[in-house]
Amino acid sequence: MADEAWEARCAALWERLDEFGREEFVQAMQDLAAETDDEAVGLFEVGGAHDSKGFTEEAVGYYGRAVEAGLSGVRRRRVSIQMASSLRETGRPEEALAVIEEERGRGSDAYDGALAMCEALTLAKLGRDREGLSVALVALAPHLPRYQRSTVNYARGLVGLDPVS
């Protein structure tokens, strides 16, 4: 696992993202990643740097290697969201949906809404707009001050499911 000092430096570099050109930021993150003993974390952060600077195809490779290297914790959840998004944007929405479905099976956490957002966009990319809208509405429902049950039931109705009572 990366130590606290390295994590702080990584966070500080991300805060300065907009100060760097495309290649400069990626290089700065590669240099920083080379300093950590946690290969999986380093690969994840380099993948994110590529993604954030528009090198989406390259990011997918780094994300896959980070998973293979044993990425864990919150970064494991984030890599699935980021990889699915990148796959969707590089013309592989079916692969993205598979990543999302696998991640959904891993449990629930604060990133559930982000995972739902990614799923909704991926379904829309596949021409399955009603399903995407349904996913988005179900994710939104818990945040509404009222109408949670009716929102979920309308969302279920969009895809032919019976209402919940």
Image (cartoon, rainbow, N blue to C red):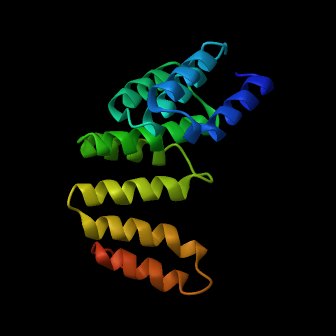
- Foreground pick, 36 / 112: 36
Percent position (x, y) of residue 48? Answer: 50, 34
- Foreground pick, 74 / 32: 32
Residue name at image x 56 percent, y 41 percent: 18
Percent position (x, y) of residue 64? Answer: 42, 26
Tag count:
0
Looking at the image, residue 135 lies above or below residue 56: below
Residue 163 visible to the viewer: no
Residue name at image x 32 percent, y 39 percent: 87
Residue 133 visible to the viewer: yes
Percent position (x, y) of residue 115? Answer: 47, 52
Looking at the image, residue 119 lies above or below residue 100: below
- Foreground pick, 108 / 76: 76
Residue name at image x 37 percent, y 75 percent: 156
Residue name at image x 23 percent, y 63 percent: 128
Looking at the image, residue 97 lies above or below residue 37: below
Percent position (x, y) of residue 133? Answer: 35, 70
- Foreground pick, 161 / 152: 152
Residue 117: quadrant of the picture: bottom left
Looking at this view, name the residue that lies furthest to the right: 5
Residue 9: quadrant of the picture: top right
Classify the position of the N terminus by image quarter: top right
Residue 63: quadrant of the picture: top left
